[in-house]
Structure formats: structure tokens, C-alpha cells
Image (cartoon, rainbow, N blue to C red):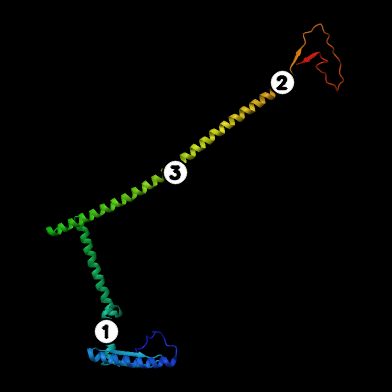
Amino acid sequence: MGRGKISIKRIDNTTSRQVTFSKRRTGLLKKASELSILCDAEVGLVVFSCTGRLYEFSSTSMKAIIGRYVKSKEENNPLLNPNSQVKFWQREAETSRQQLLNLQKTQRQMMGEDLSGLTVRDLQLIENQLESSLDSVRKTKGKVYTEEIQEINKKGQLIHTDNIELYKKINLACQENMELQKNIQLYEEHEANDVRNVLNDSQHPYAFAISNKAHENTNLELCQPNEKPTAASLGFQLI
């Protein structure tokens, strides 16, 4: 049976952790030694235990290996060394300056300047670049115009829809206004008829006729102050 899989995490038990460290440290040092012998590699190994104890292995000299390591880091990353850092930024500045000059020259040539000394092939390349750039500009311009037209059409459609809704509301308001005017007119006519009837009733509360019998005597009788004369006492006949 093979050994079970060990979970790679910190061992909580102090004794087990120390035993595991001792075994694996021995195996690591052995592997480093074998690697240096089999592959003719310069190997340097430094291990500090959790208690701070140092364990090391070097195929040659640990000091020489560390020196070689520092030198290699400086060569691969020149910013670590001040002198190398100055030279690095000087090279970067010179490269950027040259790129700027080339871009300015290309821009002038694109504008039709500084064309002297160019061969026919160089002029054809510039012409092809200009045509390609012009085609790209036209495509971008057409795309922008198309998007703007679509946006305007959408806004026009929305305005048209709002206009239709507003027209419906105006028609509804006009119909309601006409109905209201009719109701007002009917109300005024009804009020005028009521007023006319009231006036007619107040002007002719009674219909009467004078008798044509002249030979009959008309009897006039005095009434008491609180009594109202009647039509019979005045010789009138109600009809």
C-alpha cells in the first residue's frame, strides 16, 4: 500500500512539526547535492528553522554563489544599481527622442513636406498610407452620420407619438367644451323661460272681465281697513 496523501498545511503539533522538518530538511539537502553533481549546477541552499537555526548547503562557496546572485539580479534589473539606473534612463530618453523625431518627420511627409530625397517606392508607401487613412476617416465619418441619423429618427418618432397623443387630448377637450357650451345654453334657456313665466305670473295674477250689464247697479261697499275688497263687491266677474 502506498502512503496516503498529506495535506499541505501547517502542522499544529510541535513534536510532529519538528520531526517532519528534520526529515524533509535532510531530504532537501540531499536533493540539492544530487542536483549539483548530476547536472554540474552551482547550487546554494539556505534554510532557517522556526527556532532560527541556520542550515545551508553550497556546491562551491556560499559567498561566491551569493555574489553571483546579486550581480545577476543587477544585470536583469538595472534599476537596482544607481549607476545602471542612470544609464538605463539615458538610453530610454534617447530612444524616446529618436521616436519623436521619426514621428514628426512622418507627419511632415504626410502633409506633403520634406519629400525631397524619397524614392518612388517611398512616395508610393506614403500615398498608400494616406489612402488607407482617408478611407478609415470616411468610414468613421459615415458611421457617425448613420448613428446621428438613427438618433434623430428615434427622436422624431417619439415627437410624432407625443403629437398624436396631444391631438387626441385636444379633440377630447374640444368635445367636452362643446358639451359644456350646450349645457350652458340649455341652462340659460331654461332660466330665461322660468324668468318669463314668473314675470307673466306677477303681471296677470288673475284674468277678469267687466260685465256688460249696464243696467245692473254697481254696489260699492266700504271695507274695514283690515279687509280686502273682493271682486264681487267691486262688480267684477272672475273668469
Q: What residue span does the magenta drawing correspond to?
A: 161-165
- Tell me if 175 is positioned left or right of 29 in this view: right
x, y percent for residue 95: 23, 69
Identify the residue position indicated by label 3 in the image.
Answer: 162
Q: Residue furthest top?
A: 215
| Residue 8, above or below 129 | below
Query: Does residue 93 show up?
Result: yes
Sequence-wise, the earlier of marks 1 and 2 is 1
Tag nearer the camera, 1 or 2:
2
Q: Give residue 161's quadrant in the image.
A: top left
x, y percent for residue 119: 12, 59
Element class at badge 2: helix
**Mark number displayed over residue 71:** 1
| Residue 9, above or below 149 | below
Per the model, the C-alpha gap separating discs 1 and 2 is 133 Å
Query: Does residue 118 show up?
Result: no
**Mark number displayed over residue 159:** none
Question: Which quadrant is the C terminus positioned in?
Answer: top right
Seen at 56% across and 31% down, the residue is 182
Front residue of 225 and 93: 225
x, y percent for residue 45: 31, 90
Per the model, the C-alpha gap separating discs 3 and 2 is 61 Å
Question: Which quadrant is the N terminus positioned in?
Answer: bottom left
| Residue 227, above or below 33 | above
Q: Inspect the image, locate mark 3, and give the three-letter code of the amino acid beneath it.
A: Asp
Identify the residue position indicated by label 2 in the image.
Answer: 203
